[in-house]
Amino acid sequence: MRLTEKSKALFEASLQHIPGGVNSPVRAFRAVGGEPFFVDRAKGAHIWDVDGNNYIDYVGTWGPAILGHAAPTIIQAVQQAAEKGTSFGIPNPYEPRMATLIKQFFPSVEKVRLCNSGTEACMSAIRLARGATGRHKVIKFDGCYHGHADSLLVKAGSGALTFGHPDSAGVPPAFTEHTIVLPYNDLNAVEAALEANRGEVAAIILEPIVGNAGLILPDDGFLPGLRSLTQQHEALLIFDEVMTGFRVARGGAQERYGITPDLTCFGKIIGGGLPVGAFGGRSDVMDHLAPLGAVYQAGTLSGNPLALAAGIAALEALESGQVHQTLETLGARLEQGMIQAAQEAGVAMTFQRSGSMFCAYFGDRPVRDLSDAMACERDRFKPYFHTMLEKGVYVAPSAFEAGFISAAHTFEDIDATIEAAREALKRAAQ
Ligand code: KE4
């Protein structure tokens, strides 16, 4: 039985000072019940909580930890940068280096602006698209999450979905009247919406692989269809690769599927675990940004030297391609083992994966959009989650989150995970 008294005491204290005791809703375990544990330290594929319990980690701080936690090159880069100061608000050499690395991995990016979170990146990309086209409307897809900016927090995924009411209080209808929400993978709906709003749609924004409703892959023709429809209608195609960027391939989903978007949003991995976001793409669009153009966007800590030192170390570790080969091998091993464990447990489970991102849905059919995800047997997720936790495996505390494997996971970690899942899936089957 896991010791939890130190985590409990810390959670009690946090509840006095912080709404829900957490600084991001999904961490509160509200979707799975029980109380969150507090982390003490993390190294490689493992985390230790304040009561000394050790877990194999498949949350990976929600994506950034692609090399594993506390990767020596990242720690060293941050230490060296910190010796010279933690923030300047003045251009520093890390900024052109990071921009060059992003362009090297993503040929669609001609210019890039750095910011401090994925939310900022997506919010700014939408403002830029509206400013560059002079149009107001934006098409997004239900279950896709692009951060918590007002106009995008409509039928969002991730934490918003976890609570089962995808819209958010506090967002006046006027702020979302220009946001059109369509079912993911439904090209006919996109064509109809573009026709019905001819000349008014500034952009279509999507997660090219949806990581905020579990893990949903695009149908074969979906992304090429979006690319040609947006070209026909002179709307911009924005790939939100905050999660998939540098994760599902060095060049993200756009490399995997061979699609060139007009703008791309980044976050997570490019910060090496520190707060960073970025958005970039066609220079004729990006040059609408202040100080060159009329679209304002700014940030005190944008281009922060510590965050960029961490992110540069992370990206440099990905350059050879070896990390992504390792991730694919580990992902395939986990997928095979989980499918076998579910068959042995006699529980219907659909395992969906792209490289080192995955989701185990309790259901017997492919999940192609949010309604499929919502139709899964979500009640089975709770006993599965808590049994995995008891057995030392930390998966995301929500059925609507993707899991992440790092390059630090070993075959032993994967095999121990599958062993734990044999029991957890049996509990879920009851
Ligand atoms: P942040 O503002 O949280 O850095 O990024 C927002 C964002 C934008 N786009 C995509 C595709 C994302 O996945 C995210 C954030 N992802 C969630 C995990 N599902 C963050 C976890 C959390 O909210 O605590």
Image (cartoon, rainbow, N blue to C red):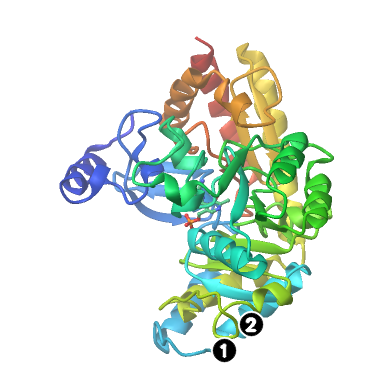
Question: Which residue does the image show at 72% across and 50% down from the upper left?
Answer: 198
Classify mark 1: helix, strand or loop.
loop
Identify the mark at residue 184; answer none if there is no mark.
none
| Numbered-mark total | 2
Left or right: residue 104 compared with residue 16: right
**Residue 167 location, quadrant:** top left
Left or right: residue 248 compared with residue 8: right
| Callout 1 amino acid | Pro
- Asked if residue 390 is positioned above or below residue 67 in the image, the reply reads above
In the rendered image, residue 6, in percent from the top left (x then y), is placed at 22, 43
User: Assess mark 1: CB under 8 A from ligand 1?
Assistant: no
**Residue 332 location, quadrant:** top right
**Which image quarter is the N terminus in?**
top left
Classify mark 2: helix, strand or loop.
helix
Left or right: residue 138 compared with residue 104: left
Category of crowding for the residue at label 2, using alpha-carbon neighbours closer than 10 angstroms: few (below 14), some (14–19), many (at least 20): some
Residue wearing tag 1: 93
In the rendered image, residue 100, in percent from the top left (x then y), is placed at 69, 79
In the rendered image, residue 424, in percent from the top left (x then y), is placed at 51, 22
Pick whichever, 389 or 19, lies toward us. 19
Residue wearing tag 2: 97
Question: Which residue does the image show at 65% across and 32% down from the upper left?
Answer: 369
Pick whichever, 29 or 6, lies toward us. 29
- Asked if residue 227 is positioned above or below residue 28 in the image, the reply reads below
**Residue 343 location, quadrant:** top right
In the rendered image, residue 191, in percent from the top left (x then y), is placed at 77, 41
| Callout 2 amino acid | Arg
Tag 2–tag 1 contact (CB < 8 Å): yes
Q: Tell me the distance, in whole angstroms, between the alpha carbons under discs 2 and 1.
A: 7 Å
